[in-house]
Amino acid sequence: MRREPPRGLADYAPLAFPAIMLVVFFVVPFSTMIAVSFFQRDAAGFYSPAFTLDNYERFLSAFFGNVLGFSIMLAVMVAVVCVLVAFPFTYLLSQASRRVQIVWLVAILSVLSLSEVIIGFAWSTLFSRTAGITNLLVMAGLMGEARALTPGFGAVLTAMVYQALPYTVLVLYPAIVRRDPTLLEAARTLGASPLRAFLNVVVPALRNTIVATLIMVFVFALGSYLLPQILGRPQHWTLSVLITDQAIYQSNMPFAAAMAVFLVLMSLALVGLTLLVGGRREAQA
Amino acid sequence: MSATFLRRILFSLVALFLAAPLVVVAGVSVNERQSLTFPPQGFSLSWYGQIFTDPGWRSALVNSLTLAASSAALAVIIALPLAWFLWRRIAPWANVFQLLGVAPFILPPVITALGFLTFWATVGAYGQPWTAAISHAIFFVTLPLVTLSLGFNSIDRSLVEAAATMGADDRTVLRTVVLPLILPYLISGYAFAFVLSLNEYIVAYMTVGFTMETLPIKIFNALRYGYTPTMAAVAVFFVALAAVIFGLIARFGDLPKLLGALSGDDK
Amino acid sequence: MSGLELQDVTKRFGDFTAVDGVSLKIPQGTFVCMLGPSGCGKTTLLRMIAGLEEPTGGAIVLDGGDITPIPTHKRDFGMVFQSLALFPHLNVGDNIAYPLRIRGIAKAEQRRRVDELLAMIHLKGYGDRPVSRLSGGQRQRVAIARALALSPRLFLLDEPLSALDAKLREAMQVELRQLQQQLGVTTIVVTHDQREAMTMADMVVVMGEGRIRQAAPPVQIYRKPADAFVADFIGSTNLIPLGRDGTLLGRPAPGLALTVGADGGKLSIRPEDVQLVAPGAGEFTGTVTFVRDLGGTIETFVDVGGTPVTAVATPRERPGFKPGDAVGVTLPLQSCVVLKG
């Protein structure tokens, strides 16, 4: 059986259920959200239909400018730290035996699937005064007295790296595993040390992958909505947190929707950029 | 400096980083008294018992398991015919649906969650438990879609042709050849969606947060009223469950191959 | 007519014509080998016969009925694929029983037939084994048995032996031929291995660039190739250009002059027919350039006035030339074939 174009209506039948589900429960909700972003807030219920740009105008305040700036800065830091750690790690993992790789992949998947709630809880425990690492430092005599490391920027950053690191490894894994091993061997036979060969051959060869991964992780980190709440102070709140806050606690759906649309546009622009980088990589290959 | 030595150092550091919070949580979860101290004082597994005996935790556990089982099943039911169609037919425009299937997973989750919130509120079904199942199914349809696409593409087409020459029509080929061959991919797709649904917070919260408590919602609510070792026990329980499920996938399937495509298609 | 008839069958993929107006009659019970270089259209032709590709034009007629519009699964043919296409999720017995099972044939009857087929392919008692635990030759036999399970109207094989090593391949060729004769089923094998074709076929169909270049019994293909393409593809041959005036290697060749057209042509002579004699004794004189002693045969490469000629002899004939030797060359007229173009 070769692939063939559908002929009759019956050939399209399998597509019906998935298409309906995806359109009704993804395209429609998504469009609804865009529509709501132009609606007015209604104090009694959720919102009332209208056409206003007020919700978008509210961005132009210094407060939201700060939140946006902080969100981007935080996501960039998370992306950079994750790639810096994950790239050499994944590279070394790809050279390990199959059994070792599988054990690591199971562990990484398990951490990746962890709820943000659990990650937040785990790190807040680790950084707490009663059960935290400072107790170990006290026991080692390095510190006089245990203290809490949360809430704080360091705690938010650490937990977000924790959340994004497994994701980074899994994004890098296929590209690094499929890389041409003879390239490195050639460099070795020409007298390069392993570290030198890694820096001079592997890193440049995967430059576009690294850029694409940075963007992917950046978008992933932008989506973090609980860790800044659990581990940070209000000044550490990101756009995602504000969206949740406006939608649920302030009951201002139109404004939340407008922020969400803005976040989508930003994410889409970056995903588009990734594809562009990927496309250029294809063209070069 | 040898590569092996470098690898040991880096692997140990990453392992330490990934394990540290979980070790602390595991330690806290066996405290004898209701306090969050580490190293634990005394040893007791009673907090694990709480998950099953305390009515609040038990109903959250049941809610979460029901939600995960049903939404993962629905995700597979959506993904299977779509992946089959894309494999069987040449219809370039149908790739739009593949894109739609992957989009909810790539976008920041808050956005998908907010989309569902506005949608369910608009149609007047806000808060119904089944809305969470549908929302999670759409949110995680990417996972079975990717594993199944990979499964279909790994089928040697001559197997299907051979079945046809022996008298099997399309339906028979599907039943006797294609489905048995993609079963492992179907199970992994289900398992991925199940584990992630079990852990998902924001979509569940925005759809049924005020009417039903899943475990992540319950933990988050509990966080605001003070910490208990039961939360730690639940966290450990989740990690263990995920590790067991992914371990099973690795045992019966080709995990490196699955992940090679998973991230590859995400881009 | 009883048998298979191809009527002007054509297959185009976009601008590329894979099979170009092929017409052929294959009588019932014939063993046909389709032979040709890769990309010549032989596999596409076989797939059209099986119904796996739809012809762009022409008709495929079996026992007087046009089967072109009939889908593959209703044709009742048996086919062996190059990859063998054994189902990895079924054991040996279930693989062979597959065509019986999907037709709802009773379990007991299925088992009886599977046992019969396993005996036929010398794999008695292998029914419960997983396919992955079989050797290459055993898998080959299972694929053949599965294709024959329903006593097909047509038995099609696409490069069935290409994955086997040389020794096993030759043994399987003989086995396959004997099996076909025993069953009397019309069989079409696609292969690029001319030895395989010569061993098994009643009729060899040589294809090139989507067309049939020659369809004839193996010996005739070898002895009387229809054109230079066939002569060159089947075995090795000396293709010696003929002069426009009927000269051969610069000398008049009276016996050939009549058959040569105005545009010249080529003379084909098999290396084993070229006779090397003492210098001055033959029709032509040349210089030995290289000698390859393969043990069983000795190949002598001779340069005759700028044209290379190869001669093959057995050690018994003791050609005994060394590079640089002058040598006489004789081309017996009865072994020569004159080809156009």
Image (cartoon, coloured by chain):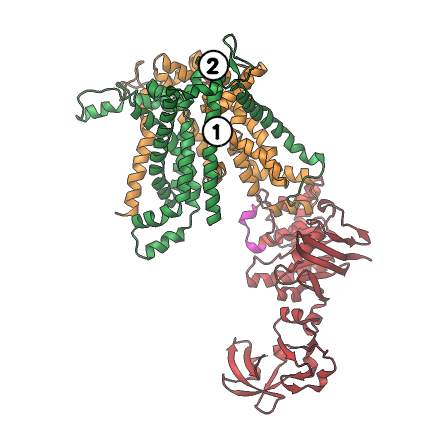
Magenta residues, start to end: C130-137
Residue C320 in percent (x, y) is at 52, 85
Q: Colour of chain B?
A: orange
Name the residue rendered at 42%, 12% in the picture. Answer: B54
Q: Nearer the viewer, residue C63 or A195?
A: A195
Q: Colour of chain A?
A: green
Residue type pointed to by label 1: Leu
Q: Secondary structure at mark 2?
A: loop
> Which chain is tinted red?
C
Instruction: Please identify the quarter of the rendering in which residue A216 is found.
Output: top left
User: Mark 2 vs mark 1: which is more N-terminal?
Assistant: 2
Whether residue B109 is in magenta: the answer is no
Name the residue rendered at 41%, 43% in the picture. Answer: A208
Disc 2 target residue: A252
Residue C62 vertical placement versus A71 (above, below) = below
Residue A54 visible at all: yes
Disc 1 target residue: A265
Residue type pointed to by label 2: Asn
